[in-house]
Structure formats: structure tokens, C-alpha cells
Image (cartoon, coloured by chain):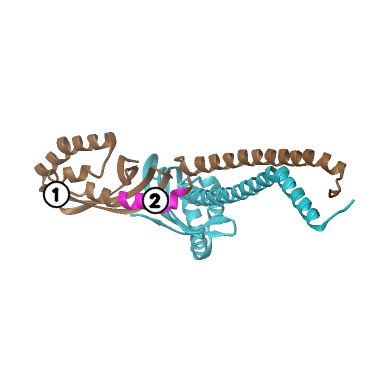
Chain colours: A cyan, B brown
Amino acid sequence: MVSSEPSLDVAAANVWVRKLREWWMVLVAAVVVIALGVACVLVGRHLSSVHEQQKADTDAVQTASDEVLGLITLDPAHIKAELAALKARTTGDFRQQFDGILATFANTVASENITAKGKIVDAGLSSLTPTTATVVVASTTKVTHKGATTPQTRNYRMSIDLSLVGANWLITGMKFVA
Amino acid sequence: MSEIKVDPLTNAAAPNRHRAWAGILLAIALVLVLVLVGLLVALRVKTHRASPNADDRASAQTTAAMTTANSSLATLLSYTPQNVSQDLASETELLTGQFKTDYTQLVTTVVAPSAIRGGVTTQAVVVGSGVVTASADTVTLIEFVDVSTTSKNLPESRVSGSRLRVTMQNVDGHWLISNLQPV
């Protein structure tokens, strides 16, 4: 038997062509799988960022609403615990200012027997950056005190500034929109 | 005749192997297609529902809705005895849906006659606003508005503050007020 070099090359090429014919489907399937995998990762990452954004929106509005609700819901018997909860949601200079009026506020509520039952009417996100937010809150409360035992309804418009500290939105400022 | 070395085992196994691989990869592709469809559906739901969790409360689109609401409210709630009727046509261009009809009727039958009779002039300023819910086509806002009023009986300006829940609808690329109610 004689085996010539060119014949071997042709034979080898034929083997490759045959292998390619046999495996082309596998190659195409592999490319499709890779493309789908990349698409899944990209869409998943976008979904995750959307989720994070939504969470930031919701958390900021919720924190502001909780603070306002705490401020307009007063019970002389639990005022210290209520004020501690309010203080826990504040930060920075505002926390110090808040700290400065806590004792007076608690004493007034207790001595005047002030009770208030508040309700958040609406709350909306005014502005948002990755680390700051401003939320406007419309609220209503029914107040009684020593001099007025019949509940008086009061409506408030408030603007709350927040900062993201770690994983939590904390309040850095609060004002009545007169 | 040339001699080609053929491995009978290789030749016999190759078709099975590539078919097996193709099958495995197609199965993976199918799973990935399902995952991708699921992710796209989740993304669609998350970005298009109108709820407090909607993602675009701070998006450019929503900011545009809020800016339009602020200027439209100031326009609608500011009037003089001279322009209260004349401006109605241009004001209704800021509105849509049933609210457009209701507003037109209210101004025609109540506000304009009262303003002309009493010499009432109002000037409205939006002093605060925030997005309550948002989706691609609808944005709900809470608006704080101060309205300063003078009249024949009230020469000194009196300012009253209100809280309004405003619904904005995107109609052909324009944000229009589709509902307005005090809260």
C-alpha cells in the first residue's frame, strides 16, 4: 500500500469538513446559549437596578410618612417612647435640634394632656438623588388637650428632607409648608 | 489507493456525541429563553404599573408631568373678572377626559358668574409637589397650592392653602390634567 502526502491532507480536510457538518448544530446552539445567557444577565441587572430604585423611592416616602405620623399622633402616657422613635429616624444637625426640644415637648404634652390621632392623607416624592430625597406629606390629626376635650381637626402640609445613611433613609430637615 | 486510518469507535460515537451535546445546549437555550421571558415580563410589570412602588417617580418623564402640573394648576386657579371666561378655551387645552367637561361646566356655571359678580381675583402658586404614583402614561401627584384672593368685599389679599391630588395623563406626548380633587 502507498500513502501519498497530498492524499492524506485531503483526507484530513474531509474529516474536518465532516466533523464540522456533524457539529455545526452544536456550535450554533452554543452561540445561542451564550447570547441568551448574556441577555439574561443584562436584563437581570437592569431589573435589579429598577428594584433598587423603587425600594429607595418607597423607603424614603415611608420614612417621611412614619415621622410625620409619629409627630401628629401623641399619647401623654407613651410620649417618651414616641419621641425616642421619632429621634431614631433623624440624623445630623436636625437630630441635634430635635434633641434640644425633646424634653420641653414631652413635658408640654404630658402637662397639657395633649392627645392627637393622626392620619397620612397623601405623601409624594418631590425629588430624589442616590443619597438625598425630599418628600411632601399631607396629613390630618384630631387633637384634644386640657382646654379642649372636643377633638379639633388640623390639616398639615409638610416637606421632609432625607439622606441615605448606610442602608436607611434618615430625616435631615422638616418644615411646615405654610 | 490511499490509506485512511479510521477509528471505528470514533466514527460510531461522534454522531451520538454531537447529537447529545446539541440536545443539552438546546435544552439550556430553552431554559434561558424562559428565564429571559420571565425577566422581561417582570421588568414590564415593574415599570408600567401605577403604584407607590413604580420605579419612575423620579424619572425625567415624571418630572415633566410634575412641572406641567405645577404650571397648569397655577394657570387654572388664577383668574380675574376680566379673563375668567375668556381664558376658559385655552385652559381646557390643559385638561382631558371627563374632567375637561366637568371643569368647563363648573367655570361656566359657578366660578365665572361668581368672579364677575363679586370682582374676585385669584393668584395661585404651587408651593410644594410630590409624586404619589407613576406609570408610563399616568402620574398622580400631591400638590400644595397657595391661592391669594381679593374681591369687592375683600380688598386686602387673603391667602388660603390647599392640598390637591392631581392625576396627569399622557395624551399623545402631552401631560394633561385628568382629575383634580382636594384632600
Given the image, on which type of amino acid does mark 1 rest?
A: Thr
Q: Chain of mark 1?
A: B
In the rendered image, residue B177, in percent from the top left (x then y), is placed at: 30, 42
Please give left or right for residue B74 compared with residue A109 in the image. Answer: left
| Marks 1, 2: nearer the viewer | 2
Q: Is residue A145 visible?
A: no
Given the image, on which type of amino acid does mark 2 rest?
A: Gln
In the rendered image, residue A114, in percent from the top left (x then y), is placed at: 45, 46
Label 1: state its secondary structure.
loop
Residue on which disc 2 sits: B61
Taking A96 as reference, is B179 above or below it? above
Q: Is residue B67 magenta?
A: yes
In the rendered image, residue B90, in percent from the top left (x then y), is placed at: 18, 46
- Quadrant occupied by the C terminus of chain A: bottom left
Q: Residue B139's quadrant in the figure?
A: top left
Please give left or right for residue B120 compared with residue B39 in the image. Answer: left
Residue on which disc 1 sits: B80
Q: Which residues are magenta?
A: B56-69
Q: Earlier in the sequence, mark 1 or mark 2?
A: 2
CA gap between label 1 and label 2 equals 33 Å
Instruction: Tell me what residue is drawn at x 28 percent, y 35 percent.
Output: B97
Camera-side residue of A78 and B39: B39
